[in-house]
Amino acid sequence: MKPFAFERARDVDHALSLAASSPGARFLAGGTNILDLMKLEIEQPPRLIDVGRLPLAEISETASGGLRIGALATNTAVASDPRVRRRYPALARAILAGGSVQLRNKASVGGNLMQRTRCPYFMDAAKPCNKRLPGSGCSAMEGLSSTLALFGASEMCVAVSPSDMSVALAAFDAVAETVRADGSVQRRPVETLHRLPGEAPQVDTDLAPDELILAVELPPPPPGRQVWRKVRARASYTGAIASVAVAGDRVALGAVAARPWRARFTEAALADGASPAEAAGAELAHADGPESRKSLVRRLAADAIREAKEGAAS
Amino acid sequence: MSTVRDWAAPNPVTENRSGLIGKPVDRYEGRLKVTGTAAYAYEVETPAPPLYGHIVSSTLAKGRITAIDTSAAAAAPGVVLAWSHLNVPAQAARGTRLNPRSQRASNPALESDRVEHYGQSVVFILADTPENARAAGGLVRITYAAEDADLDFLSSLDLAGPAPGEEDARVGDFEAGYSASEVTVDDTWFSPLQNHAQMEPCATTAWWEGDKVVVHTSIQMVKGGQHALAETLGIPSDRVRLFTRYIGGGFGGKGQAYDDLTLAALAARESGRPVRVAYTRQQMFQATIHRPAVQMRVRLGADRSGRLNAMALEAVTHCARNAPFVEHAASFARNLYAAPHRLTGHRLVLLDIPHAGAMRAPGEAPGMLSLECAMDELAEKLGLDPIELRIRNEPEVDPDNAKPFSVRQLVRCMQEGAQQFGWSRRHPTPGAVRDGRWYVGMGMATAIRGNFLLPAKAGLRLTGDGLATLTQGMTDIGTGTYTILAQITGETLGLPLDQVRVELGDSDMPPAPGSGGQFGAATAGSAAYETAMVMRRRLSELAAGDPRSPLYGEDPTLMDFANGNIVLGNRSESLAALASRAGPEGVYVEGGISPAADARDWSQHTYGAQFAEVGVDSVTGEVRLRRMFGVFAAGRILNAKLAKSQITGGMIWGVGAALTESNPVDPRFGSFLHQDLGGYLAPVHADIVNLDAVLLDEADDKANPMGIKGVGELGICGAGAAIANAVYNACGVRLRDYPLTPDKVLAALEAKGL
Amino acid sequence: MTTIRVNGVDHAVDVDPRTSLLDLLRERLDLKGTKKGCDHGQCGACTVLVNGVRINACLSLAVMHDGDEVLTVEGLASGEVLHPVQQAFLTEDAFQCGYCTPGQICSAVGLLAEVAAGQPSEATADLDGPVTLTDAEIRERMSGNICRCSAYPQILAAVRRAAGAAA
């Protein structure tokens, strides 16, 4: 780990001014991702701004009947919240499918949204990787990892977002509220918070260096059943090969793109009365990748949509 | 030299009058482990504050270091020294031995500009803190000149040559027998490269006392480690004192010394300070040994009644170019089933990747993943139950050499297992059982693993406080060595367990071969038993010759030991009293065991039967264990609780081999795809559902004086095959490319139109 | 200066910001019971309880814990009397090599509190109902602690036994 300066933010303004005045500084909340990467020198921030004790962990009702989740609420706190469990069970289940209890006890909602890909070639500092070292090439494209993007990839990068939580958030049309040092507040849909790699895969999000996530807001849940499913090689404590969140008539796919992937073609097909299989196929028709992987995602999405319509197979 | 006949008479262990043998007592060192006070190699107290070493690994597979710049690292905060091949202190040339009797040769670190595999140590940093050492490592700049390398096993199969010093084992005329068979199976299986993934990374703490180095290191073989370090440093082995008291998992991967040991010793000498060095988790993957991949072609030919007429298992595997190792994946077949025409053998591809080596049940672990599934295929073709097929091919004598079995309860394992597991509820037609979106199926396989006895010694001291202390240059890698040695010593001397101490893992103690090949319990235990018998004779003679003893003048051969006393008729004396009269140090004896002269006249193995029930997700191809059960026969069991832990632990390794574990080599770089425990998927708790095992009553009187055998490796044997057979029974998909990950299962389901 | 209370003892340490909570415990406070298995939150061997909540000590900086109360495996027993979870691990033989054991034990202590607090897991069938300590719940909640010796069946039995002792 490279040496860095550590500073605990007294309040939000202090955190933002520190960020604005120190190029390359990073916010530190739970630390479960950035410290992992700093040990491997994949991240080398000269300064860490500890925002972990700022009063941003509250979960509260919104006027519109949704929930506002403070950015520093831990994964565990969100998944354990009775309102989340009752009204957004797909979100609770997505969170509970991620990492381990120990990680979820430390990881925050804001940090979860900021976590970086776990592509093995990104995680190995000795390998070419455009996301880590722009212009060095993409080792994953011709590599051995099978969990690659099916949507929105570029010639530069095929990495996927590892977040389970954000898949459910995207299905609920959640919005991330951020603030910058100049006091400007922005509201960004979680669905598009992350950039697609394009020509600059090293930039994960549109957030400015001095931009801090304050909260995630969930609109009221859509009517209808919610389903969360995650495919993985072992039964727990591992990332998704693919995942899906269905909330009423909305469908989001996980581990298939650099962002949680709202399956808009699927949703449109469903609105037109398509069967679950047809609707899933409508999205996958736009996918780019190995047939076997497309097939997995198609089957998974179709079955989750079917379950949302009919209930679990007995 | 003794013969097995000498072992036939009843003895204190086989008579087991106080019942310590077999008793499920708690782990001897358990209290230290549950309180976090057992000090592993990196954690031992040092005589002065330590310095911290960090190793920098090569990112090249094969070639030369053309330039190396450690100046920034050497000048970084807290750095004491930065070594590369240019300035590392002199070490003995690789492979040389100062002492021709050394068990291991010199194994120098940072020896030259040559790079022979990815992950090889290329720089060593010593600093005041772990943070400074590691950060300095990141400042090293190296330029490499790459050379052509052979890195990809499956695309290098045409480079396979004979395994050194081996010929194929041929019986009869396999080709003729196979082509004349009425029913045949001919398929090829692939078992991938796997990693040990011990929880404790390799680590050493070292300091010097004058011209003698003291090292605490995590190694399974005490003498092996001591000799390797002595030869590398070019000093006599009595100037190396090696301790390895607690080892955080070995599984074969710590059977040898790595560069942490050498560099810690060198750096401690150079700095004059104690030094701690540990591998990172990433280095554990890249810089220690692994189980190599194996491709196996199995051909079976049988008549319509299911009698095997021809059997071939041909294995191709790999090892590092300069570190010969053969994964003997075909050998077990020679002892398992009889067929008049047989062919088994191994081919080897030399690659420029990290070293292949022994990992839990080398040979059987990957090997049984093929043959035991081929038997399942054959059973289906014959319309036979898989157990019935195996019973019809159960040999009378060892098919390999016509030797009688010392004891073979394989059929009983299968039959009792079938009953307890509920095998009769298995639907023979694949895909017939559904539970919601899950296909459900059952599978079984046999287990076989050899039993060995190696020479070993032990020391035993009885002191005036009545305590018996057994000392042995042996290791406990979690296997239970401490505990069983205490039980054997206590039972043999008639002492309660709280009167017995066991000290292990010190090169100054009487030597034992260490932990490996599931020979540890039988070997170390037999030495402990023989030593305790020496103590009995010594104490009997002391009593008979001591006028102060109530047993004075009596025949020492008639004296008995019970409840802490030496006894003859109605007279007795406490061992404590006897020992205290013998002198301030009490009584010390040494003893040992050697294999019987005629031990090889019998076929000695451990056996088992594995049963698994799995669910296969019809949507995604995910496979999940639903339950697993095994019945095993492995001689007399010394501790029912610890033996079962060993067995079920092995079975769970089989679950990993079948479903999740694999580490492919990236042929562009020569590195492993997975370099951490997030990528390399060892089973987690949620993977293991309703898993249990039973050990049959057995005593193998040809094995050793106590009739015990090993259990550490048997549990993995056949376990993965039972799961693969269950997957087939569940959904009709016969996958021969391990592990059975969702992508492969789903592709096969789709190919069947499911 | 970072002040931290570990197993009831206050410490004030001047610590390198890079030092993980794990390395603070092991290298500075000489509490080596907490193990370093992977250093990346992928094995659970470093699990400790911070303010009563289990976390991976390797993925936390010591400086983040100013004012926190840390409980490690060394702080569980009361003198010679083992904590019920420690005793259950010993009785059920819920370990072999012992290296993951302190983390498993701290994890189990945390688990029992989480279940008592009604926190759900992936194994909780009804998120809207009460949480009961089924075998599936224990397995899932202990899945953040890898045991390569694979003592999982015995760990399950130990957690069940400890839960019974606590009830």
Image: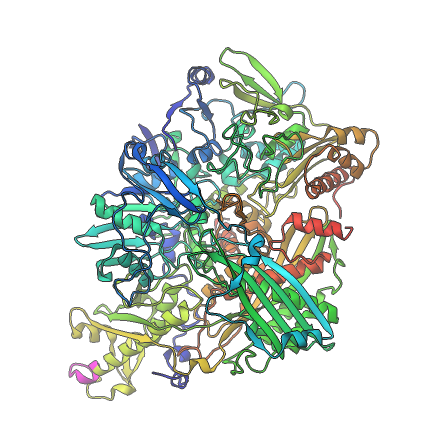
The quarter holding residue A24 reads top left
**Residue A119 at x, y = what percent?**
55, 37
Mark yes or no: residue A138 visible. yes
Q: In the figure, B2 relative to B372: above or below?
A: below
Q: Report which quarter residue A240 is drawn in.
A: top right
Horizontal and vertical percent position of residue B638 = 43, 70
Residue shown at 37% from the left, 58% from the top: B256
Query: Does residue C145 appear to the left or right of B44 in the view shown?
Result: right
Q: Is residue B544 magenta?
A: yes
The magenta segment is B542-549
Q: Nearer the viewer, residue B450 or B537?
A: B450
Residue at left offset 25%, top offset 86%:
B556
- The answer to whether B334 appears left or right of B27 in the picture is right
Is C166 rendered above or below residue A151? below
The spot of residue C84 in percent (x, y) is 43, 51
Residue A51 makes an appearance in the image: no
Task: Check residue C167 for magenta coloring.
Answer: no
Indicate the quadrant where residue B1 lies: bottom left
At horizontal 55% and vertical 52% (from top left) the residue drawn is: B661
**Which is more toward the observer, B300 or B536?**
B300
Q: Which of the pair B37/C39 is nearer the observer? A: C39
Q: Position of residue B318 (x, y in %)?
A: 51, 58
